[in-house]
């Protein structure tokens, strides 16, 4: 490796370590101060799962960087290559499914007025998120790959079939579309409730609850918006990769590092959004630092 490559690898490793530490702080704050938060337990559990998925994604990308380039990549067996890439895919999928699960939880709580008293439901949801994410990630190692069919290979992910990349891209866009649609509907509903409550009983506790829900909804919607912004360049590259014949789009390789770096920075943005927009999270972080 050249000096420039080694420097870039070192910088990315440090950034990934900071992202892991940042999201670990979110998990610790949620765990230690969960009883003092007004946010619903189910939503806190899913937000914790999102932070965990972000930490795993950063760690997986760090391992990917350290095992990439020159002899490091050439020394990998197909099984190890699939494991390296699959870890990142699983973390991304779990993060996406967490977004959908959080949106569905808020939809059930606000629109359908489901009380959600079962404490096992969020744990089952988290387990389902990771089970499906891992299943999607291991599909290439189970046979959905391009080994023996070079013309079907992805340019960015050489052992992945372009059909598999297209499947992952379509599933991601479908999940994001569903999440955005749910949040848009929820935002309108909660805003209407807040407006109605302020007109009828501005001093009652029933008025404060919709405002707190609206604040949480804005925070989660901002998280989704930042996610879309950070991941859109990579999604665009993957779409070009699917449409382009193998090895005939060299621009993909030149732009991939920047798109991936921006996507990884999304995992660093979520805790900052929590601290900036959520009073519960600000208090939890403050208590964590002061203890």
Image (spheres, grey):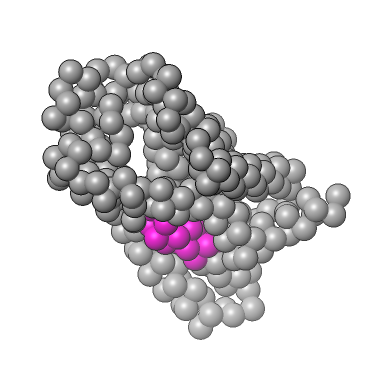
Residue 263 in view of the camera: no
Q: Is residue 194 above or below residue 113?
A: below
Residue 153 percent location from the top left of the image:
20, 31
Q: Nearer the viewer, residue 228 or 148?
A: 148
Q: Nearer the viewer, residue 82 or 118?
A: 82
Q: Is residue 92 above or below residue 111?
A: above
Residue at image point 74% right, 43% down: 32
Q: Main secondary structure of the magenta part?
A: helix
Count of numbered badges drawn on the protein: 0
Residue span colored magenta: 216-231
Residue at image point 42% right, 30% down: 70
Is residue 68 within the magenta segment?
Answer: no
Residue with the most extreme front position? 2
Q: Is residue 112 above or below residue 92?
A: below
Residue at image point 53% right, 80% down: 198
Residue 190 in view of the camera: yes
Residue 116 percent location from the top left of the image:
51, 43
Residue 22 percent location from the top left of the image:
65, 48
Q: Horizontal placement of 286 versus 104: left or right?
A: right
Is residue 229 within the magenta segment?
Answer: yes
Residue with the most extreme right position? 291
Residue 76 picture quarter: top left
Residue 108 percent location from the top left of the image:
42, 50
Residue at image point 40% right, 44% down: 96
Residue 232 picture quarter: bottom left
């Amino acid at each position: 490796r050249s000096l420039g490559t080694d420097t870039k690898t070192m910088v990315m490793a440090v950034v990934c370590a900071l992202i892991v530490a940042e999201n670990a702080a979110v998990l610790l704050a949620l765990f230690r101060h969960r009883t003092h938060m007004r946010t619903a337990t189910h939503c806190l559990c899913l937000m914790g799962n999102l932070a965990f998925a972000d930490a795993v994604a950063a760690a997986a990308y760090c391992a990917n960087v350290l095992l990439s380039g020159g002899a490091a990549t050439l020394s990998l067996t197909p099984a190890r290559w699939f494991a390296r890439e699959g870890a990142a895919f699983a973390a991304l999928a779990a993060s996406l499914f967490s977004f959908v699960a959080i949106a569905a939880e808020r939809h059930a709580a606000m629109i359908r007025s489901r009380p959600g008293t079962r404490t096992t439901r969020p744990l089952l949801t988290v387990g389902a998120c990771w089970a499906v994410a891992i299943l999607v990630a291991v599909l290439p190692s189970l046979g959905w790959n391009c080994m023996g069919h070079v013309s079907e290979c992805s340019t960015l992910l050489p052992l992945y079939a372009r059909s598999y990349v297209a499947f992952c891209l379509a599933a991601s866009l479908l999940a994001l579309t569903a999440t955005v649609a749910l949040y848009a509907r929820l935002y309108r509903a909660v805003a209407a409730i807040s407006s109605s409550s302020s007109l009828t009983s501005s001093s009652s506790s029933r008025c404060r609850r919709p405002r707190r829900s609206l604040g949480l909804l804005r925070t989660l919607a901002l998280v989704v918006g930042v996610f879309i912004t950070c991941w859109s360049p990579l999604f665009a590259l993957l779409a070009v990769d699917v449409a382009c014949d193998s090895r005939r789009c060299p621009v993909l390789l030149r732009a991939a590092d920047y798109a991936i770096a921006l996507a990884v920075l999304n995992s660093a943005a979520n805790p900052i959004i929590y601290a900036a927009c959520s009073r519960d999270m600000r208090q939890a972080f403050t208590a964590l630092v002061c203890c």
